[in-house]
Amino acid sequence: MIKIKYGKGSPHLFIDRLVVKLNFLPGESAYQTHSALFTIFDDPESFSGTSFKKPNELSKKIVLASVANSKHHPHLIYRHADHQAQWMRLTLHPREMGLQGFENLHSVLIMFVENGWGGFVAKAKVTQIEVSIDLEGIPFNSVHVLPDQAKTVTVFKSGQKIETVYFNKSKSSQTVVYDRAAKRQKKGQDEKAGPCTRIERKKSSLNLCVHQLGELTNPFSHIKFVAVPAVPPPDEAKEYLWTLFTDAVAQRGLDPALKMLPQAKRTAYRKYLAAQKKDWWLPGAIWLSWPSVLEDLKLTDAKFWT
């Protein structure tokens, strides 16, 4: 997850969720990994929980002393056969872990994986990453995302209020925009309950190794934040149609409201809205901080972990 607080200095970015998979070739190394892991798999200082997904597949959390909330501890799924490791997958929460958390993780991994986290940096594939931006001070009901026409869009309402908009399906590269302030209020985080809109971007099927994360393309460059003005387009002869449209936007969301229109009217309104871009939305400037995010965590620095 990547976070930015507007009005509070330079954008501060961070990753919230990262899923990586390390494959093993049959042989002595895979045998040693399996033997070493099973020696410590029941050690409560290293692992917690027990879940046998399949006869040859195990699932546990890796204990991190520096991370207080166990729900943010790395989740390990391990597949083996014939007393040899086949693959292991880690689900990580780098934002919550920080560099200290990765150092704790490394101290556990190195007991059964060559070079510990450095082994993942060198050879593991990134199967999924989630990045986000918090727009602190930006009320959710004041912003609208103009999606590509081919996108699948789902709107979630709490009572009469729209709180979340999903673009694309959850199993694909999905974008979620939601009212972060409302979520904080529901959690009783009143001290953080000021206006805030969050954008989450999930990317799957990246075909990148961990050490190649610096090559990740800007996942927010396609997003267009626009205003829905009270004034209709200059060529709209029937102003009441625009009023009805803006009422539909408030009740249903921008994309569902657009889809209610005839094709010609939808095209005209989309063109008008595309010209109403928010000047505070600068995804290119935000993404300039990506290299420093990786550097702060030493996430892709194999030399650091040797």
Image (cartoon, grey):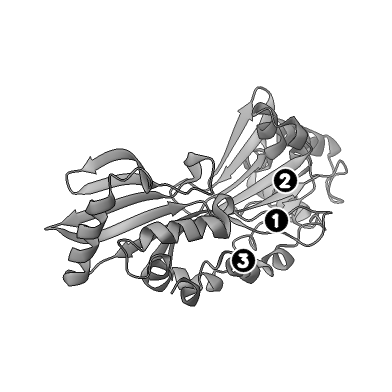
Amino acid tagged 1:
Lys
Residue 45 visible to the viewer: yes
Residue 227 against residue 289 in the figure, above or below: above
- Judged left or right of residue 23, residue 68 is right
**Tag 1: Cα neighbours inside 10 Å, few (<14), some, or many (≥20)?**
some
Q: Most extreme residue toward the left, as rendered? A: 82
Query: Of callouts 1 and 2, which one flags the residue occurring earlier in the amino acid sequence?
Result: 2
Query: Badge 2 is on which residue?
Result: 144
Expressed as whole percent of the image width and height from the top left, the position of residue 260 reads: 64, 38
Query: Of callouts 3 and 1, which one flags the residue occurring earlier in the amino acid sequence?
Result: 1
Quadrant position of residue 53: top left
**Which of the two residues, 210 or 268, is positioned nearer the viewer here?**
210
The residue tagged with tag 3: helix, strand or loop? helix
**Which of the two residues, 129 or 262, is positioned nearer the viewer here?**
129
Query: Of callouts 2 and 3, which one flags the residue occurring earlier in the amino acid sequence?
Result: 2
Residue 121 against residue 34 in the figure, above or below: below
Residue 203 against residue 69 in the figure, above or below: below
Amino acid tagged 2:
His
Query: Badge 3 is on which residue?
Result: 296
Q: Mark 3 to mark 1: distance in Å?
A: 29 Å
Q: Which mark's residue is nearer the viewer, 3 or 1?
A: 3
Expressed as whole percent of the image width and height from the top left, the position of residue 263 reads: 64, 47
Count the marks.
3
Amino acid tagged 3:
Asp
Asked if the residue under mark 1 is in contact with the one under mark 3, i.e. CB atoms within 8 Å, the reply is no
Quadrant position of residue 139: top right
Q: Mark 1 to mark 2: distance in Å?
A: 8 Å
Query: Badge 1 is on which residue?
Result: 224
Expressed as whole percent of the image width and height from the top left, the position of residue 108 reads: 38, 57
The residue tagged with tag 1: helix, strand or loop? loop
